[in-house]
């Protein structure tokens, strides 16, 4: 990397989709923003096709389809990766690091799986890999975890970290369309991943909670072992019943220390209407961090979309530019430290509350049978009510107290065998 103390700092941008276009727009229009932005040049932009019509007007000769040449270009000081996907994004970032270039990325899929590899390579080269855009979109969450919250012993992260699913759940709760319509709108607004199943199935949120837990607790998270359940099975009727019982349904991502193990999971969850996360609507994300001596802090803001994500990405670019100008050695708060292994809690051992909707024959004694079965497995109930009926079947909604997951599932397996039980269409967890 060249000494650019008095020269422009050259940026190579990989990808010119939703986020890439947002980033380019800011870099090409620095007036009124941080003064360091005026010292940056968008040197090369790596794309798939040079001929694709684009609304953004870029300086001539900037576009290239040779992404490998971009990351090896000696004139480029820092590479912004907003291609998405695991490959070639991971390899290109490693090559850029190998060439002594700093990397800024919004790619949570790569960072949740290969973060340690990238950070180690970066530290060895004395460069940074920054990823503020990867979690919470425009919400500053990565930098606060690495810097302003450094005094704390953090114990819990609880958040809504996927904009697409929060948008879909909000639209459905407010009766503004079904699942498919809401998803199509989220895609057209640039919130969804190029394959939206990562959003809908909770995998995107699982990537993000894995990244946050690694930073907050200084531990290695095995991404494959993060329990993950999406919102595909949520029905409008459950959203209505949840509201009647005083809850909202949210896709919650959570990580907390439980003894010597890590409880880390993503699933749709009923959360009391009094909880601040219950009123987080649409594409907004919010993350509650708990620790000592802080207590709790909640960070909220737009969790997806071109502008908010580009705000986070270019914020990282400004941080790198500042270190290039200061030229004073490796900055320990920008680098990411080493992590240690921590076992992850098996799902059966997790303690949580449950909501379940059970369809039964409408006959006397059924509620009693259900209550006894739950009781026999040590599952204590907060409420059990016949809330409606559906095609001559009684619709019984059960909300439990905090129980061991394994016990709940044992009870449910027995209940499925009851002759009076026709179906169990919904099981959701309840936060408390
Ligand atoms: N859209 C959001 O709100 C958002 C928010 C936070 C993070 N992110 C992350 O940012 C990244 C980009 O997301 P996006 O929404 O801009 O996606 P996108 O699909 O709109 O853009 C990606 C661009 O990269 C290009 N690309 C992909 N592979 C390429 C290759 N091999 N060669 C050349 N070009 C290639 C695609 O053609 C596309 O134009 C992803 O990692 C995503 O997870 C997106
Ligand atoms: N697809 C992601 C983008 C932001 O990371 C979401 O909807 O939250
Ligand atoms: Na962020």
Image: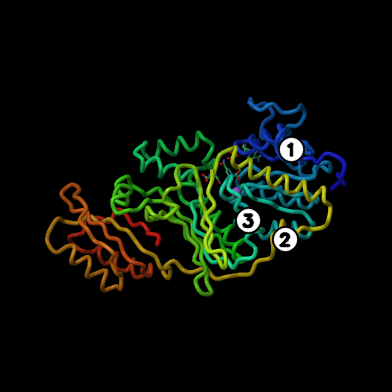
Q: CA distance from mark 3 to mark 2?
A: 21 Å
> Residue beneath label 1, please?
66
Q: Position of residue 267 (x, y in %)?
A: 43, 56
**425 on left or right of 315:** left
For the residue pair 326 and 380, the one nearer the viewer reads as: 326
Q: Give the quarter of the image for residue 31.
A: top right
At horizontal 77% and vertical 38% (from top left) the residue drawn is 40
Instruction: Report the disc number at residue 144.
Output: 3
Circle 1 Cα neighbour tier, 10 Å, few/some/many (<14 / 14–19 / ≥20):
few
Answer yes or no: is residue 113 visible.
yes
- Left or right, 162 with respect to 431, comes to right
Marked residue nearer the N-terminal end (2 or 1): 1
In space, the residues marked 2 and 1 are separated at their CA atoms by 26 Å
Q: Which residue is label 2 attached to?
A: 120
Q: Position of residue 357 (x, y in %)?
A: 27, 55
Q: Earlier in the sequence, mark 3 or mark 2?
A: 2
In front of the other: 303 or 289: 289
Rendered location of residue 415, percent (x, y): 25, 64
Q: Are marks 3 and 1 in contact (CB under 8 Å)?
A: no
Q: Is residue 307 above or below residue 220?
A: above
Colour scheme in the image?
rainbow
Which type of secondary structure does the marked residue at label 2 adopt?
A: helix
Tell me which numbered mark, 3 or 1, is placed earlier along the sequence.
1
Task: Identify the residue at horizontal 26%, vertical 62% (top origin).
Answer: 383
Disc 2 C-beta below 8 A from ligand 1 = no
Can residue 225 be seen here? The reply is no
Residue drawn at x 32%, y 49% is 243
Per the image, label 3 sits on a secondary structure element best described as helix
* 249 displayed left or right of 60: left
Q: Is residue 281 above or below residue 213?
A: above
């Amino acid at each position: 990397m060249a000494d650019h103390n008095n020269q422009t700092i050259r940026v190579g941008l990989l990808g010119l989709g939703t986020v890439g276009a947002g980033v380019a727009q800011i870099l090409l229009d620095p007036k009124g923003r941080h003064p360091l932005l005026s010292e940056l040049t968008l040197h090369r932009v790596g794309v798939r096709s040079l001929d694709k019509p684009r609304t953004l007007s870029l300086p001539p000769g900037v576009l290239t389809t040779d992404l490998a040449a971009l990351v090896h270009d000696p004139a480029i000081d820092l590479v912004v990766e907003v291609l998405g996907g695991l490959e070639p994004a991971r390899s290109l970032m490693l090559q850029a690091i190998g060439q002594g270039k700093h990397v800024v990325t919004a790619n949570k899929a790569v960072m949740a799986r290969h973060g340690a590899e990238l950070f180690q390579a970066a530290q060895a080269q004395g460069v940074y890999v920054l990823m503020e855009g990867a979690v919470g979109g425009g919400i500053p969450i990565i930098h606060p975890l690495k810097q302003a919250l450094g005094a704390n012993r953090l114990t819990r992260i609880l958040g809504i970290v996927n904009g697409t699913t929060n948008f879909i759940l909000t639209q459905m709760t407010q009766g503004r369309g079904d699942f498919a319509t809401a998803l199509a709108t989220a895609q057209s607004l640039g919130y969804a991943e190029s394959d939206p199943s990562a959003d809908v199935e909770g995998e995107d949120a699982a990537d993000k909670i894995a990244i946050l837990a690694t930073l907050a607790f200084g531990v290695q998270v095995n991404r494959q072992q993060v329990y993950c359940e999406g919102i595909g099975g949520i029905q409008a009727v459950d959203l209505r019943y949840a509201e009647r019982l005083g809850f909202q349904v949210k896709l919650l991502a959570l990580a907390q220390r439980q003894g010597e193990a890590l409880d880390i999971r993503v699933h749709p969850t009923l959360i009391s209407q009094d909880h601040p996360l219950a009123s987080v609507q649409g594409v907004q994300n919010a993350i509650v961090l708990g620790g000592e001596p802080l207590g709790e802090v909640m960070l909220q803001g737009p969790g997806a979309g071109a502008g908010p994500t580009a705000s986070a990405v270019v914020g990282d670019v400004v941080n790198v530019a500042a270190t290039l100008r200061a030229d004073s050695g490796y900055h320990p708060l920008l680098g990411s430290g080493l992590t240690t292994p921590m076992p992850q809690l098996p799902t059966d051992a997790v303690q949580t509350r449950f909501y379940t909707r059970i369809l039964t024959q409408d006959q006397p004694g059924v509620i009693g049978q259900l209550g006894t079965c739950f009781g026999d497995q040590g599952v204590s109930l907060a409420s059990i009510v016949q809330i409606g009926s559906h095609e001559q079947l009684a619709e019984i909604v059960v909300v439990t107290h905090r129980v061991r997951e394994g016990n709940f599932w044992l009870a449910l397996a027995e209940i499925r065998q009851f002759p009076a039980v026709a179906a169990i269409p919904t099981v959701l967890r309840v936060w408390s």
